Amino acid sequence: MSTHVSNIRPEWDPVIVDIVDYALGYEVRSDLAYDTARNILIDTLGCGLEALEYPAACKLLGPVVKGTTVPQGARVPGTQFQLDPVQAAFNIGALIRWLDFNDTWLAAEWGHPSDNLGGILAVADWLSRTAIAAGRKPLVMRDVLTGIIKAHEIQGVIALENSFNKVGLDHVLLVKVASTAVVSQLLGLTRDETLAAVSLAWVDGQSLRTYRHAPNAGSRKSWAAGDATSRAVRLALIAQTGEMGYPSALTARTWGFYDVLFKGQPFRFQRPYGSYVAENVLFKISFPAEFHSQTAVEAAVTLHGQLAAAGRSVEDIRRITIRTHEACIRIIDKQGPLNNEADRDHCIQYMVAVPLIFGRLTAADYEAGVAADPRIDVLRAKIHCVEDARYTADYHDPDKRSIANALTVEFNDGSSLPELAVEYPIGHKRRRRDGIPLLEAKFRTNLARRFPKKQQDAILAVSLDQRALEAMPVNEYVDLYVI
């Protein structure tokens, strides 16, 4: 006996409708959100400029077919490439993410909302250059900042209550969804076209977390977000042709996202879309390290000084205990051999050992030359994590959103240093007053890596001026970064 399946076209899934209506219709009125979005922009572009110092990142750049030129294409900051918007989004997104130094959002799911800038900036730049060539007005940087706020919000609000990592999916799927919605708005897609585009993002193949975890941790984690945001641009352009969408992409029985990839569970939501995520995002300011380790690294740098002041060395250490939160243990508590840079920057033992030994943690410290120092692995083996239930609760508390770590160093002679706890990293909203000057200093450092003084000054003059930046045509701002 067969059971007939209804072929009546369903209504659009409410989750998809909410994303689309927010992307197309919500008016951002928060001055704090726009000010933070400007800081997100400069910090994110700075991360991309630093990544250009690494050949492993640079080998992925440029057009798909070497020598291809796109006369009105999008520029890739810090390079001479001018590409179609899909490939430009990949280039920008891969650079942004390469060193794991851009902003972070931690909740049931974690991720890096500024990954979306790859698609947003590429499309806005391409549209602006195309408009000027046709005698029309270009987009201005306020449009980019609005896109940043909305992409952060879509990715971050979904992440608040829904853990994709627990079902083996990588957080870059949220980059693809958020970028698709925001890019569709920039492209001027109709509501029906945008609904189709977002549904295409949900039914698209989703990335596994394989490349983020032992024993397979590898460099794809550094370009996965570039792939996701560029895929979003491609899907939005497909929808713009009038290609159909899939209304129950999430809820369709058997074949929808929930049943196939989310163990049959619908998404849960803590709050409506607004500007909460951009206002509360976490900046990585001091250390290019997986964010659950940021406070541990900060504590380790301080402890390095305490060791020196006490006339001690790391050879005197018998054991280090890290009191931490559950997510840290699940993601970066790792023993055994570390096979590459991607392995090292997702190992809290490595990220604590290096600053204890050297008093620093930089992107270069993940390279093989530093990792070969035998003291690092000896010290790693002495570092152990234990969960503190309060730290885990405060991590999920929307009013706190702490990322706490506390380190205790015990010596071979039985003595120890007092436990050093850091609950909020320098990039947390609660430490903005201290953090923003350091964020701007980080940006200045990254500009100096790539540009002569005159060019640095021109970029800084507009980038640190909210009104001037918002009014500037996108193509003119991006051209400031061309070498």
Image (cartoon, helix red, strand yellow):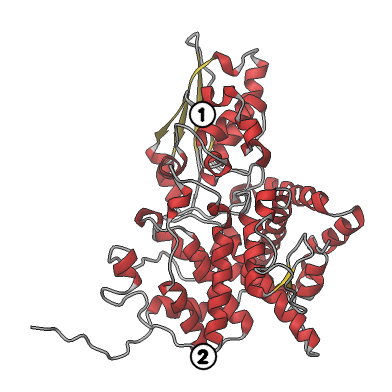
In the image, taking residue 263 as reference, residue 158 lies left or right, namely: right
Label ID, residue 201: none
The spot of residue 463 in percent (x, y) is 79, 62
Q: What residue would you read off at disc 1?
A: 407
The spot of residue 391 in percent (x, y) is 43, 41
Which is nearer the eye, 332 or 38?
332
Q: Is residue 272 above or below residue 280?
A: below
> Residue placed farthest to the top in the image?
413
Which is nearer the eye, 279 or 134?
134
Residue positioned 66% across, 42% down in the render: 363
In the image, taking residue 263 as reference, residue 25 lies left or right, namely: right
The spot of residue 372 in percent (x, y) is 61, 28
> Residue placed farthest to the left in the image?
1
Q: Is residue 15 above or below residue 45?
A: below
Q: Quadrant of residue 324?
A: top left
Q: Is residue 147 above or below residue 353?
A: below
SS of the residue under disc 2: loop
Which is nearer the eye, 391 or 122?
122
Amino acid tagged 2:
Gly
SS of the residue under disc 1: strand
Q: What residue would you read off at disc 2?
A: 242
Residue positioned 78% across, 74% down in the render: 475
Residue positioned 72% across, 59% down in the render: 42
Amino acid tagged 1:
Leu
